[in-house]
Image (cartoon, coloured by chain):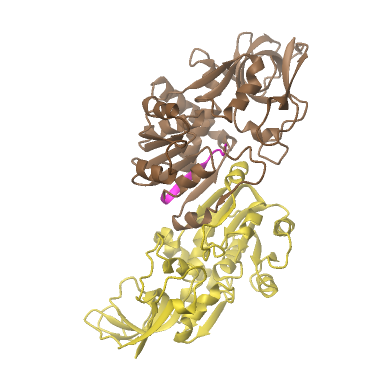
Chain colours: A brown, B yellow
């Protein structure tokens, strides 16, 4: 039998287990020019919350009673396609099924001898590329500048911090537990890290950690944490708007301080992006990330949940900050 | 006697006539390497509201009981300086005095045969350069794209619209009276213009005027008008944050919808600036604006108030939208 996870309901506010539905189907037959894939690793990501709604977005919404899809690594277990053979591993956007067929389009072969398979969902996949291009194309940190990263213990955040360091910047992370804060300093080399749950006045905490002000803010969270970073931004600062996890589950339009006054006062740039904007530069990014990884200059952490049945719960756990680094389900 | 206008009080909210104080002093003596200047034209500008407060800003605040200063055109009526002679006209940041001395630093000679003197405070001065560089360096409109300008009947706004047209964009203006709206279309060549005081639902009015969405938004006002433009922004749109006159007199921190969600969703850039950031490119800008002006491709409007005593009132009138185009006082 072949378990499949469908979108059962569109969530209001925080998604629930009941928004998902498990069904069982037959294992599909492989036609000519197709391959049969067995799911190995499934990526769950905050941006997927947007696809569960039917509001207009940069990606089309998931359909009700249709399988959810996300970044996945799968093994080719049968091939009638000339470009793939049994035993190949591939990465791509696939459906939340134990087994599925594919015509091979938009799949990329990955090499398990070069890096662990799960790395292709993270540091050498969308996560690493999101960190790399957001920081390089928008943040453009110069040597000696101060970079602040929110959601710093997350998969993207911890990579941003390390790339910032490799580019010669002073890096400060913001996270929500003492454990994450000490991980940022001991494991990922952040100069300073701030626990927003215990720091009291965040604006002052950031001013203290960044005595020369903030030149680049890589924002994964939005909301009041970001307001307190904005208050410390330097003239000609750059704000990389990568994510706003604090706002995604809001049921009404989130409001806060207007940004125009400080954007003008300090000549600040604020830019949102999705990684697809830089698709033509992916090879450059993967090359640079692989080199750093091989030279042991880039570390990554994963939270690996085991079992196909736990995919929805792993996704829900993202919104409670239960992951350290990339959240992955091993099937 | 020599009238001078001082900052009497720092305003709370909307500035008042009583925030200014007139005094009379002797006409100053000219020392070696100095010139004596007689004020001819005085520029009053919304950004000066910021300098009346003592909050941190990109320019230092005016000092209490010291003269206000702004962009001015003056005539050299006595010279002990080798670079200036009697009868020269100069442009620069000068004090609100009928007569003052200067060492000539940071003054630029202007030629009254090439353009009317007051133009050097507007279309060939900070106003024109602000429109030109904000649009070219941040907005970067491409042929056929849609540009929306708020505060469109103002000095900067009406110039932005015309430059947008010269660059091949479709230009839509937002202003606050029917008279301004018809001026935008008949005089400045805007394709569409919207009166925000009578249009009802602004978001819908903009959607109707911009059926292909908004690629570039040149924002002079901030606040709810801008929210309604943001709601119509296209993927990869650019928001030039030039001014926020609707927020300048706010006595508490202005709040509104958070921008991060649409910045991410649409990969939008939002950037504040001050014209000084582009100082090294001023000659390029003045050259291009002069050429357009000479070829009659660029029109400008001025509201000229007469009399030194009316300078404070002219400034206050800015916040009630009483000016059409650049507000200037002729002394």
Instruction: State which quarter of the image contains the C terminus of chain B.
Output: bottom left
Q: What residue sits 50% from the left and 31% below the top?
A: A156
Q: Quadrant of residue B144?
A: bottom right
Judged from this view, the residue extending furthest toward the bottom is B1
- Percent x, y for residue A282? 53, 31
The percent coordinates of residue A328 (x first, y second) are 57, 21
In reply to whether residue A244 is colored magenta, the answer given is: yes
Instruction: Report the residue that reaches farthest toward the left.
Output: B32
Q: Where is residue B327 in the image (x, y as percent from the top left)?
A: 52, 76
B180 on left or right of B54: right
> Who is closer to the viewer here, A292 or B29?
B29
Determine the image quadrant of residue A183: top left
| Magenta-drawn segment | A234-245
For residue A144, above or below residue B331: above
Is residue B240 at least partly visible in the picture?
Answer: yes
- Identify which residue is drawn at 49% across, 60% down: B133
């Amino acid at each position: 039998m072949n378990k499949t996870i469908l979108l059962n309901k569109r969530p209001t506010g925080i998604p629930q287990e009941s928004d998902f539905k498990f069904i069982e189907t037959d294992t599909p037959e492989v036609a000519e020019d197709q391959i049969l894939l067995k799911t190995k690793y499934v990526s769950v990501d905050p941006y997927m919350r947007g696809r569960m709604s039917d509001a207009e977005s940069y990606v089309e919404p998931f359909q009700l009673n249709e399988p959810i899809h996300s970044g996945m690594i799968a093994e080719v277990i049968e091939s009638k396609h000339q470009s793939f053979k049994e035993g190949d591993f591939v990465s791509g956007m696939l459906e939340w099924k134990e087994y599925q067929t594919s015509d091979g389009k938009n799949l990329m072969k990955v090499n398990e001898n070069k890096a662990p398979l799960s790395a292709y969902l993270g540091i050498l996949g969308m996560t690493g590329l999101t960190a790399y291009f957001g920081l390089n194309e928008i943040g453009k940190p110069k040597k000696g500048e101060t970079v602040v990263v929110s959601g710093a213990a997350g998969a993207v955040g911890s990579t941003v911090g390390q790339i910032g360091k490799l580019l010669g910047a002073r890096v400060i992370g913001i996270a929500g537990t003492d454990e994450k804060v000490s991980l940022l300093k001991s494991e990922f080399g952040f100069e300073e890290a701030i626990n927003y749950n215990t720091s009291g006045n965040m604006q002052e905490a950031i001013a203290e950690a960044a005595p020369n002000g903030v030149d680049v803010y890589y924002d994964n969270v939005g909301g009041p944490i970001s307001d307190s970073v904005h208050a410390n931004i330097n003239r000609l600062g750059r704000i990389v708007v990568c994510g706003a996890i604090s706002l995604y589950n809001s049921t009404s339009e989130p409001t806060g301080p207007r940004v125009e006054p400080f954007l003008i006062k300090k000549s600040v740039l604020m830019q949102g992006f999705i990684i697809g904007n830089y698709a033509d530069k992916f090879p450059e990014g993967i090359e640079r990330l692989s080199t750093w990884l091989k030279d042991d200059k880039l570390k990554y952490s994963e939270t690996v949940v085991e079992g196909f049945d736990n995919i929805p719960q792993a996704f829900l756990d993202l919104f409670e900050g239960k992951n350290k680094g990339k959240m992955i389900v091993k099937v």
